[in-house]
Amino acid sequence: MRNLILWLFVLLPLSTLAQERDPTRPPVNETETIANLDSWAEELKLTQILYSEQSQSARLNGQWVKPGERVDGVEVTSIKPNSVVVEKSNEVVEITLFEPIKQNKKGIPGAVQ
């Protein structure tokens, strides 16, 4: 009986460890978002963003665009410091240039002040 209780104390913690989520796996939301993108959004390639409070432009599929302009049938609705929001057929998609490491005091990705 004593051995049985001892084994329960050893095996029970092991089973709870096996049920924990793997911290190296991406969040489910990101995976679902990527899987649900239309083919038109997957074909867009964002390579550069020039951003200031007065002017924003981005290089999308090799063309420089500003908010309100169109490229390959897709309208650029807004340009942020790290991403571009595009719309086609009433579907809005945000394309990010890179994952920011840190954010400044205003919450904007970029140089930390």
Image (spheres, helix red, strand yellow):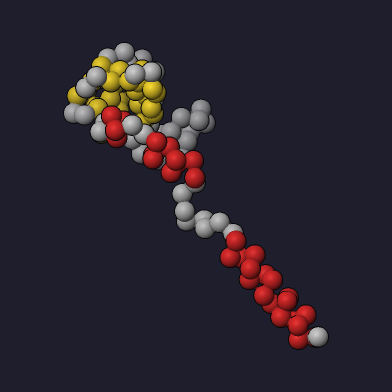
Q: Image check: 68 left or right of 71?
A: right
**Residue 3: image x %, image y %?**
76, 86
Q: Residue furthest right?
A: 1
Res. 14 visible in picture: yes
Q: Residue at x 52, y 58 (%)?
A: 22
**Residue 15: image x %, image y %?**
63, 68
**Residue 74: image x %, image y %?**
28, 20
Q: Quadrant of the N terminus?
A: bottom right
Residue nearest the viewer, comparing 36 with 99: 36
Q: Quadrant of residue 46?
A: top left
Q: Residue at x 25, y 33 (%)?
A: 43
Q: Quadrant of residue 49?
A: top left
Q: Would you place residue 75 above or below residue 48 in this image? A: above
Res. 48 visible in picture: no
Residue nearest the viewer, comparing 64 with 87: 87
Q: Residue at x 38, y 22 (%)?
A: 91
Residue nearest the viewer, comparing 102 with 21: 21
